[in-house]
Amino acid sequence: MDARFTEIRPAGIDDLAAVAQIVCEAYSPYIDRLGKPPGPMNDDYAAHIAARRIYVGSDAQGVAGFVVLLADDAQFLLDNIAVADRARGRGLGRALMAFAEDTARQAGHGAVTLYTHELMHENRALYARLGYRETGLVQEKGFTRVYMEKPV
């Protein structure tokens, strides 16, 4: 991770506005392609923060990216990951992915599962480059989602 980023830490309620701004930056460009706001734009981030499911990485300007992790006995799901426009291309996204994978491994899970919309081709290609393989196409919450998995 770029030395300009702080350690990844659990999000607090003071981070909510920054998380919401990053969600808007990251997902608004897909609205025209999908014909509606992507699923992450509808999530309850205050509830995720209260449940300690969001982890953030910051730079000198504040929260620069986050990851939402959902785990139970059966699955470790990387539910959402987003990086602020100002921080793209500086390694925070990869650091958040590695954090998710390390967290899954430490919790005793053998794989990380994630999903993206079938029309988000850039994400599908990025995840494939990071070692995730497609495992299924699912109609869920009004979206066609491609599920992917990576052994950890």
Image (tube, rainbow, N blue to C red):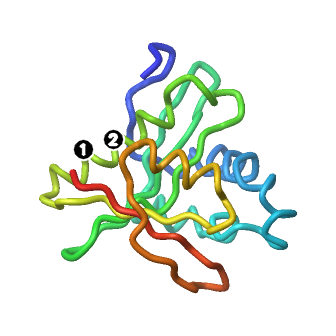
Nearest to the observer: residue 49 or residue 26: 26
- Where is residue 121? Give x, y as percent: 64, 56
Quadrant occupied by the N terminus? top left
**Picture layout, residue 38 above or below residue 132:** below
Q: Residue at x 57, y 62 (%)?
A: 45
**Picture layout, residue 108 above or below residue 93:** below
Left or right? Give the position of 25 relative to 49: right
> Among all residues in the image, which is located at the extreme top?
3
Nearest to the observer: residue 95 or residue 8: 95
> Among all residues in the image, which is located at the extreme left?
108
How many marks on residues?
A: 2
Q: Residue at x 70, y 27 (%)?
A: 86
Q: Residues within 10 Å of mark 2 (few under 14, many from 20)?
A: some
User: Hey, what amino acid is under mark 1?
Assistant: Asp
Q: Residue at x 52, y 70 (%)?
A: 146
- Residue identified by numbered label 1: 102
**Picture layout, residue 66 above or below residue 149:** above
Left or right? Give the position of 121 relative to 112: right
- Residue identified by numbered label 2: 99
Q: Residue at x 48, y 64 (%)?
A: 48
Q: Residues within 10 Å of mark 1 (few under 14, many from 20)?
A: some
Q: Secondary structure at mark 1?
A: helix
Q: Are marks 1 and 2 in contact (CB under 8 Å)?
A: yes
Q: Secondary structure at mark 2?
A: helix
- Where is residue 101? Give x, y as percent: 29, 47
User: Hey, what amino acid is under mark 2?
Assistant: Phe
Left or right? Give the position of 139 relative to 6: right
Whole-angstrom CA distance, mark 1 to mark 2, is: 5 Å
